[in-house]
Image: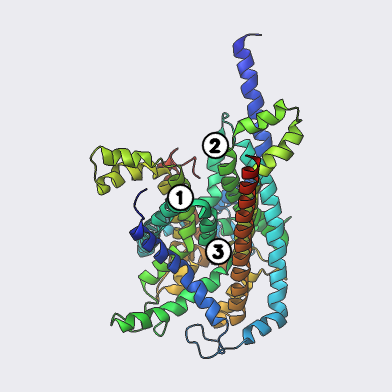
Amino acid sequence: MNVQALACRFVLRRWLKANALLAPTGLWLGFFLIAPLVVVVEFSFATRHTGVARAVLPWTTRAYLTALDPAFLPIFGRTLLYAGATTVACLLLGFPLAWFIARYGGRYRTALLAAVLIPFWSSYLARIYAWKALLDGEGLVNTVLGWAGLDRDGGFLLTNGAVVLGLTYGFLPFMVLPLYVACERFDVRLMEASYDLGHGRVSTFFRVVLPGVMSGVLAGSLLVLVPAAGDFVTPKLLGGVDQSTFGSVIDDQFRGGNNWPLGSAMAVLLLVLVVFVLALRGRRGEDVL
Amino acid sequence: MNRRPWALGAVVALVFLFLYAPIAWLAIASFNSSRSLSRISGFSLQWYSELADDTRVFASLQLSVQLALASAVISTVIGTLAAFGLRRAFPGRGLWTVLLSLPLVVPEVVMGVAMLGFFMKLAGVPLGFGALLCAHVAFSLSFVVVVVRSRVSGMDVRMEEAAADLGASPFVAFRTVTLPLVAPAVAAGAAFAFLLSFDDVVISSYLTGVGSTTLPVFVYAQASKRGISPEVVALSTLMVTATALLLIIGVVIASWRARRAGSAAKLAV
């Protein structure tokens, strides 16, 4: 037997072993994630029906034409604004935290990481309502700010800021964990080398540290941006009068049994965003996620 | 590092304040004598005693715990297998990682409506516990894989090779060497999966059937009518306190064991 055939058999065996281990996960995701997503794509081309079968033949692209109607533009804009601002805020809060735990956490690293997650053992809705109470006109935040004369009539509830704050709170752990992995792997000696070579703190941060932890930044942003774009509970509870977002429009179309094809078409548009962001990340950050 | 990072430490303290402020507020409000969350009017244990008596909260809590346990067990077992499958490079690994990152990235509302459509189309799976379990495993799996995989890829292959060289069969080597090494990550993955399932509102709200309301869905339905119930605030407080206590016990045990191992090493020298 020649060397090539041996190598071939070796690769084949490894491939078989890996796929055997991955098979249960693949089957589960195939049945309960991929198949449902395919059903959504199918629905998005169907015709609306108000009976038990909510989406029926014939095929049509009407749902997409409706979804791309200019009337929905403000909703798209608001959704992207919320998701983008949330991602930036999570990065700004998450990076110092991840860097600190990775660099100075010592033997308390695991405990500190767990401490980031502990608040999330309370009910998600209870947490949002806690923010609602804190941001209220009579709430703690407004009262404390009132001592400095910075309070606001009616508090900070029902503002865009409140929604971004709530979303940031909810998604922060998803940013911190991948950032932590990247920070822990980052070799600090590179920073020292940069200082020795005459770079200042700012230039070292942007030219050495940031590229070094980029995989974590990308992975974290991925975990925050798209899920935040789909969230509708937080805007509903913390936002003002008209807080329709992408997610809430989809929810309305399905929950009321209103218009499944339209809801599906909008879900497909969000999936396109998912694919776009995944492609943007490419292979970088793959090892962190 | 020669300098102590005071500025960084201050920022980190503020971030932790941000993380814990609502939780601390919930704990205070759970002892409030009125229904309000924003105004504290007096101390009472009313909500805790009502929580203990509320059979509807209890029934949905029971269902949520059963569901989260089942989901955590299934996703931990098959997710750990998958993490080992991804250990070495093979043709097609990139595709698998894309598939596994999908549940992390697809928004909950999209997954929820997709599964609703899927289960409605397939008359064989009625909404309720079965549908909920299928969905919960699907969205928790990837988190288990990510957590376990980070540990598996950092593991020293030579440890297992040494076990094999010393005559251990693959099964014995796995049980006595590999498994103890990855156990902390598997436990973390299981805790993650439990939490994700236990706290899920959006996806579950599409899939609950008659008589199978999970706690978060029950809370959401109630909250949209008359605000969040103080009993739920009390329950949340109990859960955070229990988790924090478990964590503290864990840290104490770990540092005690590290100290004991340290003194044993000194004795040996």
Res B197 quadrant in image: bottom right
The residue lying at 55 percent from left, 83 percent from top is B226
User: Residue placed farthest to the top in the image?
Assistant: A1
Q: Secondary structure at mark 3?
A: helix
For mark 1, what is the residue?
A: A102
For mark 2, what is the residue?
A: B95
Label ID, residue B161: none
For mark 3, what is the residue?
A: A118
Q: Is residue B144 visible?
A: yes
Tag 3 subunit: A
Instruction: Give the mark toward the camera: 3 or 2.
Output: 3
Q: Which one is in front, A45 or B2?
A: B2
Tag 1 subunit: A
Q: Secondary structure at mark 2?
A: helix
Q: Which one is in front, A274 or A191?
A: A191
Give how far across and how far down residue B32 sits, in percent.
Answer: 55, 86
Q: In the image, B112: left or right of A67?
A: right
Q: In the image, B60: left or right of A218?
A: right
Q: Are marks 3 and 2 in contact (CB under 8 Å)?
A: no
Give how far across and how far down residue B221 sits, in percent.
Answer: 60, 75
Q: Is residue B131 visible?
A: no
Q: Which residue type carries mark 3?
A: Ile
Give the alpha-carbon distance from disc 2 to disc 1, as whole Å: 30 Å
Colour option used: rainbow
